[in-house]
Image (tube, rainbow, N blue to C red):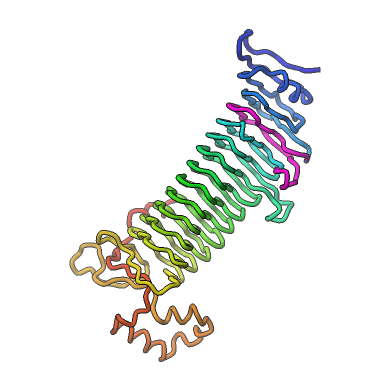
Amino acid sequence: MLALVCLSAPSSADELVVATPDSLAEALRNAAPGDTLRLAAGTFRGPVLIDRPLTLVGSEGSVIDAGGGGRVVTIDAPDVVVRNIAIRHSGADLSVEDSGIFVTKRGDRALIEGNRIEHCLIGVYLKGPDNAIVRSNTIIGRQDLRMNERGNGVHLWNTPGSIVEGNTIRFGRDGIFVTTSRDNRFRKNKISDLRYAVHYMYTNRSEVSGNESVNNHAAYALMFSDHLEVLDNVSIGDRDRGLFFNYANFSNISGNVVRGGAEKCVFIYNSNKNSFHGNEFRGCDIGIHFTAGSEQNTFAGNTISGNRTQVKYVGTRYLEWSDNGRGNYWGDHTAFDLDADDIADRPYRPNTIVDKIFWRYPQAKILANSPVFDVLRWAQSRFPALHPGGVTDSAPLMRPPGLAAISDNR
């Protein structure tokens, strides 16, 4: 028996209360386009299919539970809203994309907001819709599977114009995974205890901004994509990398903070014509690892400080890391500023002949304080032509830019 209560006068769109746990699937089949179905408190049986435009909204204590089989909620119509519901216990088969909420290519403009998605293989999967929004959800992924067998918090494929913002995502495999898309926005998400916070491939003209990555293997892995805005993101205590760029080009990377012991604050691999301004890279084993033919990147106004190795450049080119007479702040650069213009009176060169030897022959570090290496250091300081190529900052800053002071309070 279907238990519904109509809360509005007869019209083209009604608000109906779904009152009994076994009645949700039938209520969805009988709903008219534009209706609002409000779930009472209680656990409703999934999986369920939404195949017409409507709003499904929960009350305090509303749960949809698939009991460990299939997708909990599938959206297969445009202009659907799913809001304020606990979504639980999808199946565990990645080959069929078991998810808490699965949106098909027919689900244009879906709004998934304020839900709590728990123990689902994939939290939310946007597979092909345009202009969908995933906002202010809490997604707690699986921990009972090996990491590579888990799904992602929010998974996006070919979903132009879609937005993922204000979500809290924890556990599972990757927080946000996107591939083969464009014009997306990933903003103000808090992501922790995963492999990658944001794992990003073949997605152009998009924005990654204001996100927080804490205690992941890596924070922001941005690959095979062009014309990105990577702004004001934070990586704290991530294990391997804060920012990772692989074949990422023509992008603006500014205002980001990486702190707290990653192996590499930034790894730049074959990425070209990017602008790095106003970032802070602090407290990593390597501040910036730069390799594999990356060209025509601009670095200025950044703070690179407190890293065991500030820059590791694998190559023989001479690279200038200043722009229009303004370079970066290097925490280990000792220099005077006799003309008081806040620019150091001598350039900063982070990589020496000795560094190159240690990178190629790590066991040579046992001789680091030997007279032989002292002679090499002295010779290079007296004869700049001996410099082996690499990064030069001709206008290093005497003090950190404003970002460093602000980020101390984060």
Q: Is residue 378 above or below residue 120?
A: below
For this orientation, the residue located farthest to the left is 339
Question: 403 above or below 28?
Answer: below
Q: Quadrant of residue 279?
A: bottom left
Residue found at the very far top of the displayed protein: 9
- Percent position of residue 82, x then y: 62, 29
Q: In screen coordinates, is 27 left or right of 83?
A: right
Q: Residue furthest right?
A: 1
* Left or right, residue 228 beside residue 12: left
- Residue 315 at x, y = what percent? 43, 73
Residue 186, given in percent of the width and then of the height, sits at 50, 43
Q: Quick check: is 81 in the magenta stretch?
A: yes
Can the viewer see residue 103?
Answer: yes
Q: Residue at x 74, y 28 (%)?
A: 42
Q: Quadrant of residue 135?
A: top right
What residue do we see at 61% from left, 53% from top?
193
Left or right: where 254 falls relative to 323: right
Q: Is residue 43 magenta?
A: no
Count of numbered badges drawn on the protein: 0
Instruction: Magenta stretch: give its range.
Output: 69-97
Name the residue located 78 percent from the left edge and 41 percent from the top edge: 68
Q: Is residue 331 above or below residue 152?
A: below
Q: Residue 157: x, y in percent?
A: 59, 43
In this rendering, position of residue 25 left or right of residue 125:
right
Residue at x 68% of width, y 18% of height: 31
Say which quadrant the N terminus sits in.
top right
The answer to whether one can see residue 287 in this image is no
